[in-house]
Amino acid sequence: MSKKKEFVDGIKGLGAEDLKVQLEQSKQRLKKLEFAHAISPLENPMSIRALRKDIARIETFLKQSQNSEAAKA
């Protein structure tokens, strides 16, 4: 199974609060990776791109969950 599919399956079951926590953790990890890459090149600089895409996926799921909660109210 691809990493993307595993990631999406992993965040589908999370609630809004869990998504927010994971989003903050991912943003912090991105800052650390970018800082490390600025000091000395990473072995795999594509990991920065993958992490940015994961953050976007989390934000999308968070927005969808907020929209579905608003529709229910």
Image (tube, grey):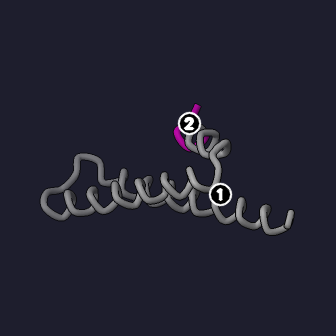
Image quarter where the N terminus lies is top right
- Is 2 contained in the magenta span? yes
Q: Toward which corner of the image does residue 29 lie, by quadrant?
A: bottom left
Query: Quick one: 72 or 32, which is closer to the camera?
Result: 72
* Amino acid type, label 2: Ser
* Amino acid type, label 1: Phe
Image quarter where the C terminus lies is bottom right
* Foreground tag (1 vs 2): 1
x 48%, y 52%: residue: 22
- Is 49 contained in the magenta span? no
| Mark earlier in primary sequence (1, 2) | 2
Name the residue at the left extreme. Answer: 39
Give the alpha-carbon distance from disc 1 to disc 2, as whole Å: 19 Å
**Secondary structure mainly formed by the magenta segment:** helix
What residue is pinned by disc 1?
61
Q: Secondary structure at mark 1?
A: helix
What residue is pinned by disc 2?
2
Q: Which residues are magenta?
A: 1-5
User: What x and y, as percent, mark residue 48?
Assistant: 36, 56
Query: Quick one: 12 or 20, which is closer to the camera?
Result: 20
Q: Secondary structure at mark 2?
A: loop
